[in-house]
Image (cartoon, grey):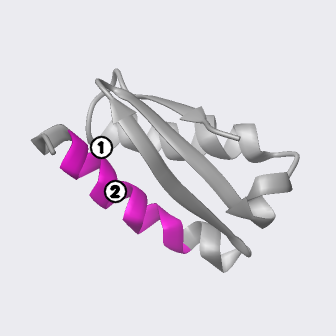
Amino acid sequence: MTDLNAKIAAKLEDLRGMLQADGGDLELIDIENKVVHVRLRGACGCCPHATMTLKSGIERVLREEIDPEIVVERVM
C-alpha cells in the first residue's frame, strides 16, 4: 500500500464514525491512483442524499486534507 493509499484509508476510517452515528457505514473497495471506490452501507446505502455525502462530504475532506486531485466514486 502506498503512502497516499494509507492516508486515504486512515481518513476514511475516521469518517466512518460520522456515518455510523447516523445509522450508515462506509466500505473502502479499492483505490486506483487517486480514484477512491467506496460502498455506502446501512442507512447511507439507500439514502437519497448519498451522492451529496460522497462528493460534498467525503471527497471534499480527502481533497482538503490529503490531495486536491482525489475523486470518490460509489460502488453499488
Q: Which residues are magenta?
A: 5-17
Packing grade of label 2 (10 A; few <14, some 14-19, many >=20) is: some
Q: Which residue is mark 2?
A: 11
Q: Amino acid at mark 1?
A: Glu
Identify the residue at image location x=26%, y=39%.
Answer: 66
Packing grade of label 1 (10 A; few <14, some 14-19, many >=20) is: few
Among the two numbered marks 1 and 2 on one chain, the one whose residue lies closer to the N terminus: 2
Identify the residue at image location x=57%, y=59%.
Answer: 26
Q: Position of residue 58 (x, y in %)?
A: 52, 46
Quarter of the image for residue 65 reads: top left
Spatial separation of the CA atoms under disc 1 and disc 2: 9 Å
Is 17 on the left-hand or right-hand side of 55?
left
Measured along the vertical axis of the image, is residue 27 above or below residue 8? below
Q: Secondary structure at mark 1?
A: helix
Q: Position of residue 7 (x, y in %)?
A: 22, 50
Q: Which residue is mark 1?
A: 65
Measured along the vertical axis of the image, is residue 16 above or below residue 8? below
Identify the residue at image location x=23%, y=42%.
Answer: 5
Identify the residue at image location x=46%, y=51%.
Answer: 28
Cβ atoms at labels 1 and 2 below 8 Å apart:
yes
Quarter of the image for residue 13 reads: bottom left
Q: Position of residue 68 (x, y in %)?
A: 33, 25
Q: Which marked residue is nearer to the observer: mark 1 or mark 2?
A: 2
